[in-house]
Image (cartoon, rainbow, N blue to C red):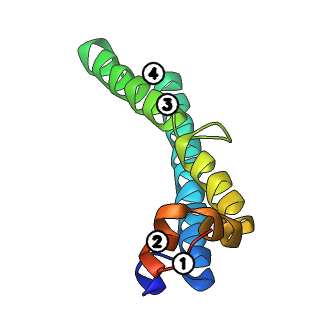
Amino acid sequence: MNSLFKCDGATMDSIKDNLVQAQSYMDQAYSQALQLQKEIVSKEDWTGKSELVAEGFLDILVQYQKAFYGVQNPQAQAIVALNELDTNLENFFSTWEDYLNLEGRTL
């Protein structure tokens, strides 16, 4: 019955790997957004309303991407939390009274 409640090591590793890969993509997207922003701002071909709209859009995009960049973003925090949970997994399940009751065990 505990397989319904416990996440095995291979599944945890898969989840962490997916989070790390997603974080890498988010970091890459942020870097590319900054590069695109620099290119558009430095080009003299853009003028008037089209320049303002493009710069405004990219500014919003860069702000959004920045929220998911680096070590303080939710994705990175999830990776840290999963690593911490992974190191304490057995202790977590062996001291969780509700889980032990479901297994028919006691503290």
Instruction: Work out how far the residue at label 2 is from the one at label 3, CA to CA, in angstroms.
Output: 56 Å
Front of the two marks 3 and 4 = 3
Q: Verify CB contact (< 8 Å) between mark 2 and mark 1.
A: yes
The structure residue drawn at horizontal position 39% and vertical position 22%, both measured from the top left corner, is: 55
Q: Label 1, on which residue?
A: 105
Q: Position of residue 48 (x, y in %)?
A: 29, 12
Q: Verify CB contact (< 8 Å) between mark 3 and mark 1.
A: no
Q: Label 2, on which residue?
A: 101
Amino acid under label 1? Arg
Instruction: Work out how far the residue at label 2 is from the one at label 1, CA to CA, in angstroms.
Output: 6 Å
Front of the two marks 4 and 2 = 2
Instruction: Work out how far the residue at label 4 is from the one at label 1, CA to CA, in angstroms.
Output: 72 Å
Neighbor class of circle 1 (other Cα within 10 Å; few <14, some 14-19, many 20+) is few
Q: Position of residue 56 (x, y in %)?
A: 35, 20
N-terminal label among 4 and 2: 4
Query: Horizontal placement of 51 versus 17: left or right?
Result: left
Q: Is residue 91 above or below residue 67?
A: below
Q: Disc 1 on helix, strand or loop?
A: loop
N-terminal label among 2 and 3: 3
- For the N terminus, the image quarter is bottom left
Amino acid under label 4? Glu
Query: Horizontal placement of 6 versus 83: left or right?
Result: left
* Most foreground residue, 101 or 87: 101
Front of the two marks 4 and 1 = 1
Amino acid under label 3? Gln
